[in-house]
Image: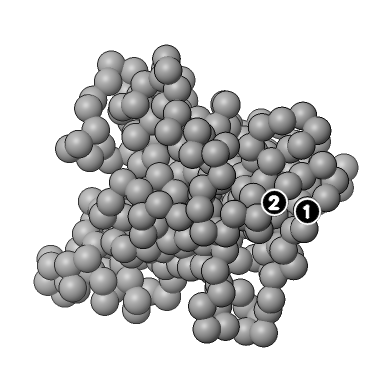
């Protein structure tokens, strides 16, 4: 086997492990020059797509509860088919409706505030479904193991006004304000863009992220104020090993357009930093009551 062929297979193996796609698909991408060993997972070519994927990660990390996550699908997806334009995600059947209810925008009429991803709309396209951003062409296609699946979409009620139902083709003022002020008056636009890179890459690597939930099927995933992502689990893959796999997949590879920061050097084990943005991995003790679960620790 030539060195070039060997590099193609290595890139394909990393891609397969990260995305859950067949090896032959990833190998075809490697042979076509779409992926390499240093960049083994295709990335979006524009910032709007990356921002949409990042917002989806933040909402799902905070919106899905630990007991709701299934079979290591920590963000609700079992595999990803990433592309330079768009992204296709395979929904876990037990989480499909919950995922949509979490990310579709709604206003809390009792306590105020917008929940979900601002500007997100769900669109039926010839028997399949997609999540589109109203502004621009950012989109995430959804696939379900049941070809006849139709989502059970949330209705108005329980103090929630479903913005996507009422304003299907234009932004609600609350959505426009949220998108305009994403970085915040005292925020750091550079670190926001860097977090978009990290979050987008996480979404495109469900196979790697799922290793944290492989033993119990779930893990604790959350963000700090919608920013950096934290993954906490107890059993199965060691923290250093999961970090190694994520780094090998290119998660922390800094793009030229993202400035290097002094804080990019990790302060503690399990911290993956890039451009002022972070993903933190924490493996702690197991409190599962079943003895076989404890033995997997």
Where is residue 175 shown, x and y percent of the image?
A: 54, 41
Residue 100 can be seen in this image: yes
Q: Residue at x 44, y 49 (%)?
A: 52
Q: Residue at x 31, y 27 (%)?
A: 190
* Label 1 to label 2: alpha-carbon separation: 6 Å
Q: Which residue is mark 2?
A: 162
Q: Residue at x 27, y 40 (%)?
A: 253
Task: Answer left or right for 195 relative to 227.
Answer: left
Q: Secondary structure at mark 1?
A: loop
Q: Secondary structure at mark 2?
A: strand
Q: Which residue is mark 1?
A: 156
Where is residue 247 shown, x and y percent of the image?
A: 36, 42
Nearer to us in this view, 168 or 58: 168
Residues under numbered marks 1 and 2 in contact, where contact means CB atoms less than 8 Å apart: yes
Task: Answer left or right for 263 relative to 155.
Answer: left
Where is residue 144 shown, x and y percent of the image?
A: 61, 74
Nearer to us in this view, 222 or 173: 173
Res. 15 mark: none
Which mark sits nearer the N-terminus, 1 or 2?
1
Give the image quarter of residue 42: bottom left
Please identify the residue farthest to the right as the structure is shown.
289
How crowded pointer 2 is (Cα within 10 Å; few <14, some 14-19, many 20+) is rated as: many
């Amino acid at each position: 086997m030539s060195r070039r062929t060997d590099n193609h297979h290595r890139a394909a193996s990393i891609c397969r492990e990260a995305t859950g796609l067949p090896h032959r698909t990833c190998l075809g991408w490697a042979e076509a020059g779409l992926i390499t060993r240093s960049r083994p997972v295709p990335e979006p070519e524009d910032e709007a797509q990356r921002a949409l994927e990042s917002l989806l990660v933040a909402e799902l990390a905070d919106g899905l509860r630990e007991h709701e996550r299934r079979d290591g699908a920590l963000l609700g997806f079992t595999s990803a088919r990433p592309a330079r334009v768009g992204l296709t995600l395979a929904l876990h059947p037990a989480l499909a409706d919950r995922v949509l209810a979490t990310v579709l925008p709604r206003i809390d009429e009792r306590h105020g505030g917008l929940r979900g991803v601002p500007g997100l709309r769900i669109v039926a396209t010839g028997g399949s479904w997609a999540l589109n951003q109203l502004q621009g062409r950012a989109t995430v296609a959804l696939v379900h193991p049941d070809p006849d699946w139709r989502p059970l979409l949330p209705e108005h009620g329980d103090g929630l006004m479903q913005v996507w139902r009422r304003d299907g083709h234009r932004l609600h003022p609350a959505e426009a304000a949220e998108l305009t002020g994403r970085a915040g008056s005292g925020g750091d636009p550079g670190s926001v863009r860097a977090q978009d890179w990290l979050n987008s890459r996480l979404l495109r690597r469900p196979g790697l992220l799922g290793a944290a939930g492989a033993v119990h099927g779930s893990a604790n995933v959350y963000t700090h104020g919608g920013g950096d992502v934290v993954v906490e689990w107890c059993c199965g893959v060691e923290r250093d090993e999961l970090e190694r796999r994520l780094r090998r997949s290119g998660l922390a590879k800094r793009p030229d357009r993202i400035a290097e920061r002094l804080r990019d050097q990790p302060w503690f084990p399990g911290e993956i930093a890039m451009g002022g943005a972070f993903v933190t991995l924490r493996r702690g003790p197991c409190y599962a009551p079943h003895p076989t679960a404890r033995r997997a620790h």
